Every structure is written in structure tokens, then in C-alpha cells.
Image (cartoon, rainbow, N blue to C red):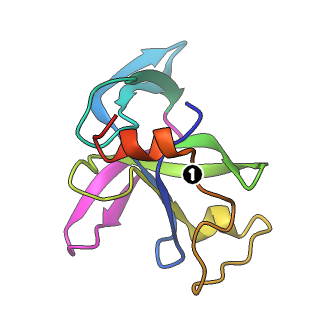
Amino acid sequence: MAWIKVKLDTGARSSALHAFDLEEFERDGEPWVRFGVRPWQGSDEDDVRVELPVHDRRLVRSSSGHTAERIVVLLDVVLLGRTVTAEVTLTNRDEMGFRMLVGREALRQGFVVDSGRSFVGGRAPKHTRRRNRGRD
């Protein structure tokens, strides 16, 4: 997946990714998870199926104050052309404006956040932005 709408969230410890149809299974005696990622708001076009080992399970408090156990996977994330490995919780973010949050643990791998600036790494191409808003 080349682009996904991401928000940097220094208030969140771990990162979170919009995932659906989570299915846990075992591979070689180890826990794995299979899930879908939907990169576009309001569209199932370009859905991606992913299989990853389960790294951990965590109780996470959402921005609305609800606590739920989430599966955590390790995911390589490219920020400003640099790849970092992030602990990412899997959750339904259908109602959120961003498909992924990048938390402070991932950002501690050499990034400084300027809260007064946006799109420091550049914007997605116009066609991609339009698709993310459900307009193609």
C-alpha cells in the first residue's frame, strides 16, 4: 500500500491501524492474525489482506475513554522516506478521519514533531487525496 492517511499522535503510546475481519490462527505453534486494511474512507476498493505474527495483546484506552484489549503487531512504517518498525494495535477506525495513528514510541525513533506544521513530508498526490475522501 503506497499511501494511507496518517496522523501523528504524541499523546498515544503505540500506533493504531484501521483493521477489519480480524481472524486469529496458529502458524508453527505461534499466534498469528489475518486482517483486512481498507486504505480509503467509505470505499472497499483496494482492500489489502495481511497476515502477521501477534506481537502482544494490550489494554488500550481510546480517545472516547473506553478500554479494550487489542492485538499488537510489528509493522514497518515509512515516514519521510525512513522506515521504522512500530508496535501497531489493530482496531476499527471507520468513524475516524485518519486510517492510522502513529504514536510516540514510533516517533521516538529519530523524529521531532512540530505541532504547528502539517504535511511536512508532503501531501499525497491529488488523485489519492480525492479517493481518500470518497471522490474519485
Q: Is residue 87 left or right of residue 47?
A: right
Disc 1 marks which residue?
87
Q: Determine if the magenta segment contains residue 97.
A: no
Q: Is residue 12 left or right of residue 19?
A: right
Query: Looking at the image, which is closer to me, 89 or 41?
Result: 41
Q: Determine if the magenta segment contains residue 57.
A: yes
Residue appearing at x 67%, y 68% in the figure:
120
Q: Which residues are magenta?
A: 54-72
Residue appearing at x 32%, y 59% in the figure:
97
Residue 123 in the image: above or below residue 105: above
Q: Is residue 21 left or right of residue 19?
A: left
Residue 132 in the image: above or below residue 118: above
| The image quarter in which residue 114 lies | bottom right
Name the residue furthest top.
28
Q: Is residue 107 left or right of residue 53?
A: right
Q: Residue 91's spot in the image, x, y percent?
A: 31, 47
Residue appearing at x 29%, y 53% in the figure:
69
* Residue type, label 1: Glu
Query: Looking at the image, which is closer to me, 95 or 105?
Result: 95
